Image: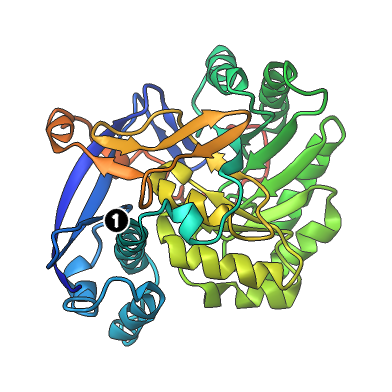
């Protein structure tokens, strides 16, 4: 079998709510869902979702190759772009090809990906994450209530501007999840918006009133020493790593004794998450994928590694035309038996979803505010 080509599609995910974080938000959010389909000379196709970045340049490394050599092809793609670097957006394209190749490999084996990778239990523990910085208290209660109905016991709030507001909103989530447990798991995501001492002050203020499981991305992603200092100064665990594109980028964090919880962006693909999980396990650290909805195939990896903690789930539905053989129940993700990564594409449904500005909206969360990390007073208002 040989890889003969690829084609791309894009669906649109209608979130039915405002979506964002401390850096910005999008009202009534609609975001692009890039889809890649890899073609073979035997007519079997592999599906990956995540990114269309640099596909032409990356695909030369796998064209004509046997798709079953997934790990070797991952390294072959890395080698093909090593002069200009695989980091950043390029890694997204590489990871989407990687996900499609794993889908192909599992289909050829006639197994769901989680079985092919060696998983025993189809259940993946998860937590709810509303990308909820712009939601009212009532909207927060409604969103997390849907997850509580599915048995979820943990949730992550987007915050970092105003500790009083964050405490109030954490209490709302806690009350909703209390229907399933007496001690809901509460996390706070600051999306790289603080400096070290600013983070210590902020988290310590919250910890006087609430037990935080972790604080996520409190500092800039490359600040290894800062994350270690912060971890020593607060009770909650420090979680970071979702925006690091390559396992080698974690080396300074590990060398500095940070983070406490290793995070992997689901968008960075199956091989990345699989390798990172084993590197973290060698250090007795748990791993937690971020953004499952951006690449559901990554959930399969979590059934096959020894150190999975929990996986972020941002929505209980997928973009039009993206059909995923997973269920949300019992506080997590229940993987199905369909051969491959569990993703099928309905192209006619995709054609009907074509509105919205997506993440390119300049007010959205992918644009870092000019004063991030430089606020003297933490009350949610810049002066």
Which quadrant of the figure has residue 261? bottom right
Q: Is residue 314 left or right of residue 361?
A: right
- Where 301 sits versus 236, above or below? below
Residue 269 drawn above or below residue 325? below
Q: Quadrant of the N terminus?
A: bottom left
Residue 170 appears anywhere in the view = yes
Q: Quadrant of the C terminus?
A: top right
334 sits left or right of 91 in the view: right
Crowding near the residue tagged with mark 1, few <14, some 14–19, many ≥20 C-alpha atoms within 10 Å = many
The residue at the far top in this view is 138
Left or right: where does residue 192 sit relative to residue 356? right
Which is more toward the observer, 146 or 106?
106
Please say whether residue 361 is visible from this viewpoint: no
Colour approach in the figure: rainbow
Q: Residue at x 16, y 32 (%)?
A: 354
Name the residue at 63% across, 72% down.
279
Residue name at image x 13 percent, y 59 percent: 43
Q: Closer to the camera, 306 or 282?
A: 306
- The mark tally for this picture is 1
**The image quarter in which residue 118 lies:** bottom right
Q: Position of residue 205 (x, y in %)?
A: 81, 37
**Residue 326 placement: quadrant:** top left
Regarding mark 1 in the picture, which secondary structure is present there?
A: loop
The residue at which mark 1 appears reads as 51
Rendered location of residue 163, percent (x, y) = 71, 33
Residue 345 is situated, as x and y percent measured from the top left of the image, at 23, 41
Which residue of the protein is positioned furthest toward the front in this rendering?
Answer: 110
Residue 323 versus residue 244 in the image, above or below: above
Residue at position x 44%, y 61% in the image:
270
Could you say which is closer to the camera, residue 30 or residue 350? Answer: 350
Question: Residue 112, image x and y in percent?
Answer: 42, 51
């Amino acid at each position: 079998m040989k890889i003969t080509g690829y084609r791309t599609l894009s669906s649109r995910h209608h979130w039915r709510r405002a979506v964002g974080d401390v850096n910005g938000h999008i009202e009534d959010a609609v975001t692009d869902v890039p889809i890649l389909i890899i073609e073979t000379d035997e007519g079997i196709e592999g599906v990956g979702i995540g990114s269309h970045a640099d596909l032409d340049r990356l695909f030369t490394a796998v064209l004509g190759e046997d798709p079953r050599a997934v790990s070797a092809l991952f390294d072959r793609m890395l080698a093909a772009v090593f002069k200009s670097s695989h980091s950043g957006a390029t890694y997204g394209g590489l990871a989407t090809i990687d996900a499609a190749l794993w889908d192909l490999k599992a289909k050829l084996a006639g197994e769901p990906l989680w079985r092919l990778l060696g998983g025993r239990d189809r259940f993946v523990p998860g937590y709810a994450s509303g990308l909820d910085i712009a939601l009212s208290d009532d909207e927060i209660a409604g969103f997390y209530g849907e997850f509580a109905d599915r048995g979820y016991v943990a949730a992550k709030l987007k915050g970092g501007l105003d500790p009083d507001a964050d405490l109030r909103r954490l209490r709302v989530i806690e009350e909703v999840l209390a229907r399933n447990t007496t001690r809901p798991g509460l996390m706070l995501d600051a999306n790289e918006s603080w400096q070290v001492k600013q983070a210590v002050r902020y988290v310590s203020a919250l910890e006087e009133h609430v037990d935080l499981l972790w604080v996520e991305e409190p500092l800039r992603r490359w600040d290894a020493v800062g994350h270690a200092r912060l971890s020593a100064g607060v009770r909650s665990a420090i979680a970071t790593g979702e925006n690091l594109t390559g396992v080698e980028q974690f080396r300074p964090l590990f060398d500095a004794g940070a983070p406490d919880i290793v995070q992997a962006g689901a968008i960075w693909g199956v091989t990345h998450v699989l390798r990172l999980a084993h590197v973290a396990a060698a250090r007795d650290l748990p791993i937690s994928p971020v953004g499952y909805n951006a690449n559901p195939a990554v959930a399969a990896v979590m059934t096959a590694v020894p150190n999975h903690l929990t996986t972020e789930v941002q929505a209980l539905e997928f973009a039009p035309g993206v059909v995923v053989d997973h269920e949300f129940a019992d506080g997590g993700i229940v993987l199905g038996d369909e051969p491959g990564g569990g993703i099928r594409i309905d192209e006619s449904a995709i054609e009907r979803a074509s509105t919205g500005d997506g993440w390119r909206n300049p007010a959205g969360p992918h644009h870092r505010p000019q004063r991030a990390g430089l606020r003297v007073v933490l009350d949610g208002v810049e002066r």
